Protein backbone atom coordinates (compact mmCIF):
# COMPACT_ATOMS: atom_id res chain seq x y z
CA UNK A 1 0.00 0.00 0.00
CA UNK A 2 1.20 3.47 -0.83
CA UNK A 3 1.15 5.96 2.04
CA UNK A 4 -0.84 9.17 2.04
CA UNK A 5 1.05 11.88 0.25
CA UNK A 6 -1.59 14.49 -0.47
CA UNK A 7 -0.98 16.15 2.87
CA UNK A 8 -4.14 14.90 4.55
CA UNK A 9 -4.51 12.39 7.36
CA UNK A 10 -7.28 9.86 7.93
CA UNK A 11 -10.00 10.74 10.44
CA UNK A 12 -9.42 9.57 14.02
CA UNK A 13 -11.82 7.20 15.80
CA UNK A 14 -13.61 8.15 19.02
CA UNK A 15 -10.66 6.90 21.11
CA UNK A 16 -8.19 8.63 18.81
CA UNK A 17 -6.80 5.30 17.57
CA UNK A 18 -7.50 5.78 13.85
CA UNK A 19 -10.35 5.79 11.37
CA UNK A 20 -13.44 4.08 12.79
CA UNK A 21 -14.07 1.55 10.02
CA UNK A 22 -10.88 0.54 8.15
CA UNK A 23 -12.70 -2.49 6.70
CA UNK A 24 -15.01 -0.11 4.84
CA UNK A 25 -17.52 2.63 5.55
CA UNK A 26 -21.00 3.15 4.11
CA UNK A 27 -23.55 5.93 3.82
CA UNK A 28 -27.01 4.37 4.02
CA UNK A 29 -30.31 5.55 5.50
CA UNK A 30 -28.80 9.01 5.79
CA UNK A 31 -25.87 8.17 8.08
CA UNK A 32 -22.39 6.67 8.07
CA UNK A 33 -21.66 3.24 9.49
CA UNK A 34 -19.41 0.21 9.03
CA UNK A 35 -19.98 -1.23 5.57
CA UNK A 36 -20.79 -4.72 6.85
CA UNK A 37 -23.78 -3.28 8.75
CA UNK A 38 -25.24 -1.39 5.77
CA UNK A 39 -28.48 -3.11 4.69
CA UNK A 40 -30.99 -2.96 1.86
CA UNK A 41 -34.61 -4.20 2.07
CA UNK A 42 -35.53 -7.56 0.53
CA UNK A 43 -38.43 -5.66 -1.05
CA UNK A 44 -36.19 -3.13 -2.78
CA UNK A 45 -36.63 -3.19 -6.56
CA UNK A 46 -32.86 -2.98 -6.85
CA UNK A 47 -32.77 -6.47 -5.32
CA UNK A 48 -35.91 -7.99 -6.88
CA UNK A 49 -35.52 -6.52 -10.38
CA UNK A 50 -31.98 -5.15 -10.69
CA UNK A 51 -33.77 -1.82 -11.13
CA UNK A 52 -31.10 0.73 -10.37
CA UNK A 53 -27.78 2.18 -11.41
CA UNK A 54 -24.42 2.66 -9.79
CA UNK A 55 -20.94 3.97 -10.39
CA UNK A 56 -17.54 3.23 -8.96
CA UNK A 57 -14.64 5.63 -8.65
CA UNK A 58 -11.34 4.67 -7.10
CA UNK A 59 -9.03 6.42 -4.69
CA UNK A 60 -5.31 5.96 -5.12
CA UNK A 61 -2.64 7.48 -2.93
CA UNK A 62 -5.25 9.58 -1.13
CA UNK A 63 -6.81 11.01 -4.29
CA UNK A 64 -9.96 10.26 -6.27
CA UNK A 65 -9.19 9.58 -9.93
CA UNK A 66 -11.40 11.41 -12.47
CA UNK A 67 -14.12 11.97 -9.90
CA UNK A 68 -15.91 14.55 -12.05
CA UNK A 69 -16.17 12.08 -14.93
CA UNK A 70 -17.64 9.40 -12.68
CA UNK A 71 -20.15 11.89 -11.26
CA UNK A 72 -21.08 12.95 -14.81
CA UNK A 73 -21.66 9.31 -15.80
CA UNK A 74 -23.69 8.58 -12.66
CA UNK A 75 -25.81 11.71 -13.23
CA UNK A 76 -26.48 10.66 -16.84
CA UNK A 77 -27.40 7.12 -15.74
CA UNK A 78 -29.81 8.46 -13.10
CA UNK A 79 -31.49 10.68 -15.68
CA UNK A 80 -31.81 7.78 -18.16
CA UNK A 81 -33.51 5.61 -15.50
CA UNK A 82 -35.60 8.50 -14.14
CA UNK A 83 -34.13 8.10 -10.66
CA UNK A 84 -33.62 10.85 -8.11
CA UNK A 85 -31.21 9.96 -5.30
CA UNK A 86 -32.41 12.91 -3.23
CA UNK A 87 -28.98 14.52 -3.01
CA UNK A 88 -27.39 17.08 -5.30
CA UNK A 89 -23.93 16.74 -6.83
CA UNK A 90 -22.15 18.63 -4.03
CA UNK A 91 -23.86 16.48 -1.38
CA UNK A 92 -23.02 13.30 -3.28
CA UNK A 93 -19.39 14.35 -3.53
CA UNK A 94 -19.29 15.17 0.20
CA UNK A 95 -20.74 11.73 1.03
CA UNK A 96 -18.10 9.98 -1.09
CA UNK A 97 -15.36 11.91 0.72
CA UNK A 98 -17.06 11.01 4.00
CA UNK A 99 -17.08 7.28 3.23
CA UNK A 100 -13.35 7.30 2.46
CA UNK A 101 -12.69 9.50 5.50
CA UNK A 102 -14.54 7.13 7.84
CA UNK A 103 -12.64 4.16 6.42
CA UNK A 104 -9.36 6.11 6.41
CA UNK A 105 -8.25 4.29 3.28
CA UNK A 106 -5.44 5.66 1.05
CA UNK A 107 -6.53 3.24 -1.70
CA UNK A 108 -10.22 2.50 -2.04
CA UNK A 109 -13.05 1.30 -4.27
CA UNK A 110 -15.82 3.85 -3.80
CA UNK A 111 -19.33 2.97 -4.95
CA UNK A 112 -22.52 5.02 -5.28
CA UNK A 113 -25.88 3.33 -5.98
CA UNK A 114 -29.44 4.45 -6.54
CA UNK A 115 -32.22 1.88 -6.91
CA UNK A 116 -35.93 2.29 -7.67
CA UNK A 117 -36.52 1.51 -3.98
CA UNK A 118 -39.67 0.04 -2.44
CA UNK A 119 -43.20 0.11 -3.80
CA UNK A 120 -46.02 1.34 -1.59
CA UNK A 121 -47.48 -1.65 0.34
CA UNK A 122 -49.85 -3.65 -1.85
CA UNK A 123 -48.98 -1.70 -5.01
CA UNK A 124 -47.19 -2.66 -8.22
CA UNK A 125 -47.26 0.90 -9.54
CA UNK A 126 -43.63 1.96 -10.08
CA UNK A 127 -44.63 5.56 -9.49
CA UNK A 128 -45.22 4.76 -5.81
CA UNK A 129 -41.59 3.68 -5.32
CA UNK A 130 -39.18 5.94 -3.47
CA UNK A 131 -35.53 5.55 -4.55
CA UNK A 132 -32.91 4.06 -2.26
CA UNK A 133 -29.52 5.73 -2.28
CA UNK A 134 -26.32 4.51 -0.66
CA UNK A 135 -22.56 4.78 -1.02
CA UNK A 136 -19.61 2.93 0.39
CA UNK A 137 -15.82 2.84 0.39
CA UNK A 138 -13.98 -0.46 0.78
CA UNK A 139 -10.33 -1.46 0.34
CA UNK A 140 -9.18 -1.35 -3.30
CA UNK A 141 -9.86 -4.60 -5.17
CA UNK A 142 -8.14 -5.70 -8.39
CA UNK A 143 -9.74 -7.45 -11.36
CA UNK A 144 -6.24 -8.82 -12.01
CA UNK A 145 -3.91 -8.62 -9.04
CA UNK A 146 -0.45 -7.01 -9.44
CA UNK A 147 1.29 -10.42 -9.14
CA UNK A 148 -0.94 -11.75 -11.92
CA UNK A 149 -0.15 -8.70 -14.03
CA UNK A 150 3.51 -9.79 -14.09
CA UNK A 151 2.58 -12.78 -16.25
CA UNK A 152 -0.77 -11.58 -17.60
CA UNK A 153 -4.28 -12.95 -17.23
CA UNK A 154 -5.99 -15.73 -19.17
CA UNK A 155 -9.15 -14.64 -21.01
CA UNK A 156 -11.95 -16.92 -22.16
CA UNK A 157 -14.29 -15.82 -24.95
CA UNK A 158 -17.72 -17.15 -24.08
CA UNK A 159 -20.52 -18.14 -26.43
CA UNK A 160 -22.89 -16.43 -24.02
CA UNK A 161 -24.41 -13.32 -25.55
CA UNK A 162 -24.25 -10.10 -23.52
CA UNK A 163 -27.73 -8.65 -22.89
CA UNK A 164 -28.36 -6.64 -26.08
CA UNK A 165 -28.09 -2.85 -25.86
CA UNK A 166 -31.60 -2.63 -27.31
CA UNK A 167 -32.81 -4.29 -24.09
CA UNK A 168 -30.52 -2.80 -21.44
CA UNK A 169 -28.36 0.19 -22.37
CA UNK A 170 -24.81 -0.81 -21.37
CA UNK A 171 -23.81 2.87 -21.13
CA UNK A 172 -25.97 3.02 -18.01
CA UNK A 173 -23.84 1.19 -15.44
CA UNK A 174 -26.12 -1.56 -14.20
CA UNK A 175 -26.43 -4.70 -12.14
CA UNK A 176 -27.53 -6.96 -15.01
CA UNK A 177 -24.60 -9.27 -14.43
CA UNK A 178 -26.11 -12.76 -14.67
CA UNK A 179 -24.67 -13.26 -18.16
CA UNK A 180 -21.29 -11.91 -17.03
CA UNK A 181 -21.20 -14.05 -13.89
CA UNK A 182 -22.20 -17.24 -15.70
CA UNK A 183 -19.59 -16.45 -18.35
CA UNK A 184 -16.96 -16.07 -15.64
CA UNK A 185 -17.88 -19.44 -14.12
CA UNK A 186 -17.51 -20.95 -17.61
CA UNK A 187 -14.09 -19.26 -17.90
CA UNK A 188 -12.96 -20.83 -14.62
CA UNK A 189 -13.99 -24.26 -16.00
CA UNK A 190 -11.56 -23.64 -18.90
CA UNK A 191 -8.68 -22.61 -16.66
CA UNK A 192 -9.10 -18.90 -17.42
CA UNK A 193 -9.27 -15.93 -15.04
CA UNK A 194 -11.40 -13.57 -17.12
CA UNK A 195 -14.22 -13.72 -19.62
CA UNK A 196 -15.36 -11.59 -22.55
CA UNK A 197 -18.93 -11.89 -23.81
CA UNK A 198 -20.01 -11.38 -27.41
CA UNK A 199 -22.95 -9.62 -29.01
CA UNK A 200 -25.55 -11.19 -31.28
CA UNK A 201 -23.25 -10.64 -34.29
CA UNK A 202 -20.38 -12.47 -32.57
CA UNK A 203 -18.29 -9.36 -31.81
CA UNK A 204 -16.60 -8.88 -28.43
CA UNK A 205 -18.44 -6.59 -26.01
CA UNK A 206 -16.95 -6.50 -22.49
CA UNK A 207 -16.34 -8.55 -19.37
CA UNK A 208 -17.47 -8.39 -15.74
CA UNK A 209 -16.14 -4.99 -14.77
CA UNK A 210 -13.80 -4.25 -17.66
CA UNK A 211 -13.40 -3.16 -21.29
CA UNK A 212 -11.16 -5.00 -23.77
CA UNK A 213 -8.44 -3.66 -26.12
CA UNK A 214 -6.26 -5.48 -28.67
CA UNK A 215 -3.20 -4.30 -30.58
CA UNK A 216 -3.95 -5.62 -34.04
CA UNK A 217 -2.93 -4.46 -37.52
CA UNK A 218 -0.98 -1.48 -36.20
CA UNK A 219 -3.60 0.09 -33.91
CA UNK A 220 -5.43 -0.41 -30.64
CA UNK A 221 -8.92 -1.74 -31.37
CA UNK A 222 -11.71 -1.64 -28.78
CA UNK A 223 -15.46 -2.20 -29.14
CA UNK A 224 -17.39 0.96 -30.00
CA UNK A 225 -20.78 -0.46 -29.07
CA UNK A 226 -22.35 -2.87 -26.62
CA UNK A 227 -20.16 -1.79 -23.70
CA UNK A 228 -20.07 0.56 -20.79
CA UNK A 229 -18.03 3.61 -21.78
CA UNK A 230 -15.42 2.97 -19.13
CA UNK A 231 -13.57 5.90 -17.63
CA UNK A 232 -10.39 3.78 -17.75
CA UNK A 233 -11.17 2.98 -21.39
CA UNK A 234 -11.39 6.72 -22.10
CA UNK A 235 -8.13 7.33 -20.23
CA UNK A 236 -6.34 4.64 -22.23
CA UNK A 237 -7.66 6.01 -25.52
CA UNK A 238 -6.39 9.48 -24.58
CA UNK A 239 -3.01 8.22 -23.35
CA UNK A 240 -2.43 6.01 -26.38
CA UNK A 241 -3.29 8.80 -28.83
CA UNK A 242 -1.10 11.27 -26.91
CA UNK A 243 1.77 8.79 -27.35
CA UNK A 244 1.11 8.59 -31.10
CA UNK A 245 -0.52 5.14 -31.04
CA UNK A 246 -3.64 4.98 -33.22
CA UNK A 247 -6.86 3.83 -31.53
CA UNK A 248 -9.97 2.64 -33.31
CA UNK A 249 -13.32 2.31 -31.58
CA UNK A 250 -14.90 -0.24 -33.85
CA UNK A 251 -15.72 -3.93 -34.12
CA UNK A 252 -13.43 -6.30 -32.21
CA UNK A 253 -13.86 -9.96 -33.10
CA UNK A 254 -12.59 -13.17 -31.45
CA UNK A 255 -10.35 -13.55 -34.52
CA UNK A 256 -8.82 -10.10 -33.85
CA UNK A 257 -8.03 -11.28 -30.32
CA UNK A 258 -6.33 -14.38 -31.69
CA UNK A 259 -4.27 -12.34 -34.21
CA UNK A 260 -3.42 -9.54 -31.75
CA UNK A 261 0.13 -9.21 -30.46
CA UNK A 262 -1.13 -7.52 -27.26
CA UNK A 263 -4.44 -7.68 -25.42
CA UNK A 264 -5.39 -5.75 -22.30
CA UNK A 265 -8.40 -5.01 -20.14
CA UNK A 266 -9.28 -1.72 -18.46
CA UNK A 267 -11.19 -1.04 -15.24
CA UNK A 268 -11.34 1.33 -12.31
CA UNK A 269 -10.67 -1.84 -10.33
CA UNK A 270 -7.08 -2.25 -11.50
CA UNK A 271 -6.40 0.14 -14.38
CA UNK A 272 -4.61 -1.34 -17.40
CA UNK A 273 -4.10 -5.09 -17.06
CA UNK A 274 -2.37 -7.39 -19.57
CA UNK A 275 -3.97 -10.51 -21.04
CA UNK A 276 -1.48 -13.07 -22.30
CA UNK A 277 -3.70 -16.05 -23.09
CA UNK A 278 -6.95 -15.96 -25.11
CA UNK A 279 -8.99 -19.14 -25.41
CA UNK A 280 -6.03 -21.23 -24.26
CA UNK A 281 -3.64 -19.80 -26.88
CA UNK A 282 -0.80 -17.36 -26.12
CA UNK A 283 -1.16 -13.75 -27.22
CA UNK A 284 1.96 -12.71 -29.17
CA UNK A 285 4.96 -14.28 -27.46
CA UNK A 286 2.85 -15.08 -24.39
CA UNK A 287 4.30 -12.32 -22.17
CA UNK A 288 2.81 -8.89 -21.35
CA UNK A 289 3.63 -6.64 -24.29
CA UNK A 290 5.72 -3.44 -24.24
CA UNK A 291 2.88 -1.16 -25.36
CA UNK A 292 0.68 -2.50 -22.59
CA UNK A 293 3.46 -1.92 -20.05
CA UNK A 294 3.94 1.67 -21.23
CA UNK A 295 0.22 2.38 -21.15
CA UNK A 296 -0.01 0.92 -17.68
CA UNK A 297 2.87 3.12 -16.45
CA UNK A 298 1.33 6.22 -18.04
CA UNK A 299 -2.06 5.36 -16.55
CA UNK A 300 -0.70 5.17 -13.00
CA UNK A 301 1.44 8.28 -13.52
CA UNK A 302 -1.69 10.19 -14.60
CA UNK A 303 -3.09 9.77 -11.07
CA UNK A 304 -0.87 12.67 -9.99
CA UNK A 305 -2.16 14.89 -12.82
CA UNK A 306 -4.10 17.73 -11.17
CA UNK A 307 -6.67 17.59 -13.99
CA UNK A 308 -7.66 14.10 -12.80
CA UNK A 309 -6.80 14.06 -9.09
CA UNK A 310 -9.14 15.17 -6.30
CA UNK A 311 -7.49 14.91 -2.86
CA UNK A 312 -9.70 13.09 -0.37
CA UNK A 313 -10.88 15.35 2.46
CA UNK A 314 -9.63 13.13 5.27
CA UNK A 315 -10.22 15.86 7.86
CA UNK A 316 -13.73 16.11 9.34
CA UNK A 317 -15.37 19.20 7.81
CA UNK A 318 -15.38 22.07 10.33
C1 LIG B 1 -19.68 -3.97 -17.38
C2 LIG B 1 -18.51 -3.06 -17.20
N1 LIG B 1 -17.75 -2.73 -18.26
C3 LIG B 1 -16.67 -1.93 -18.14
C4 LIG B 1 -16.29 -1.41 -16.91
C5 LIG B 1 -15.07 -0.51 -16.79
O1 LIG B 1 -15.47 0.82 -16.51
P1 LIG B 1 -14.51 1.84 -15.70
O2 LIG B 1 -13.25 1.92 -16.45
O3 LIG B 1 -15.29 3.12 -15.70
O4 LIG B 1 -14.32 1.26 -14.34
C6 LIG B 1 -17.07 -1.70 -15.78
C7 LIG B 1 -16.70 -1.17 -14.47
O5 LIG B 1 -17.03 -1.71 -13.44
C8 LIG B 1 -18.21 -2.54 -15.93
O6 LIG B 1 -18.98 -2.85 -14.88
Image: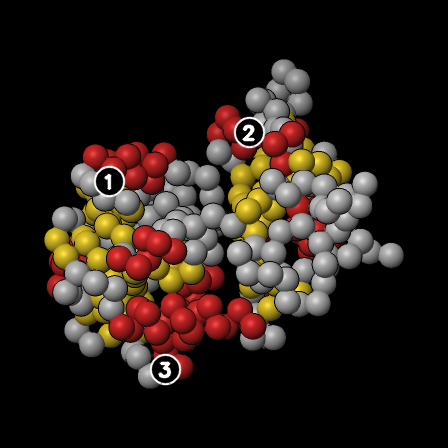
Relative height, residue 52 to residue 246 (above, below): above
Which residue is at the far top?
122
Q: Are marks 2 and 3 in contact (CB under 8 Å)?
A: no
Any mark on residue 303, and which? none
Sequence order check, earlier mark of 1 and 3: 1
How many marks the image carries: the answer is: 3
Residue 110 horizontal side relative to residue 130, left or right: left
Viewer-side residue, 250 vs 8: 8
The Cα atoms of the two marked residues, 1 and 2, are separated by: 30 Å
Secondary element at image label 2: helix
Any mark on residue 45, and which? 2
Sequence order check, earlier mark of 1 and 2: 2
Image x and y of residue 20, in percent: 72, 41
Any mark on residue 243, and which? 3
Q: Are marks 1 and 3 in contact (CB under 8 Å)?
A: no
Viewer-side residue, 93 vs 205: 93
Disc 2 under 8 Å from ligand 1? The reply is no
The Cα atoms of the two marked residues, 2 and 3, are separated by: 45 Å
Residue 318 horizontal side relative to residue 159, left or right: right
Q: Give the residue pinned by disc 1.
A: 187
Using the rendered view, name the quadrant where residue 190 is placed: top left
Q: What is the crowding at mark 3: few (fewer than 14 residues within 10 Å), some, or many (at least 20)?
A: few
- Is residue 140 in view? yes
Amino acid sequence: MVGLTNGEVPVAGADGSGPPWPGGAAWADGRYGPVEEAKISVLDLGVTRSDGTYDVVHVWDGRFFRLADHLDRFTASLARLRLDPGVDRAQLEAILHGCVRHAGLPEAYVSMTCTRGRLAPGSRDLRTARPTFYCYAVPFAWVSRPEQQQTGARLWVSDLVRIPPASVDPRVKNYHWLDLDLGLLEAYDHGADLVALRDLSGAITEGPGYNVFAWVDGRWLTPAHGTLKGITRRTVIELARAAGEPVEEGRLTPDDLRRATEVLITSSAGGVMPVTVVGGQPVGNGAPGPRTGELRDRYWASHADPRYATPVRYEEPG
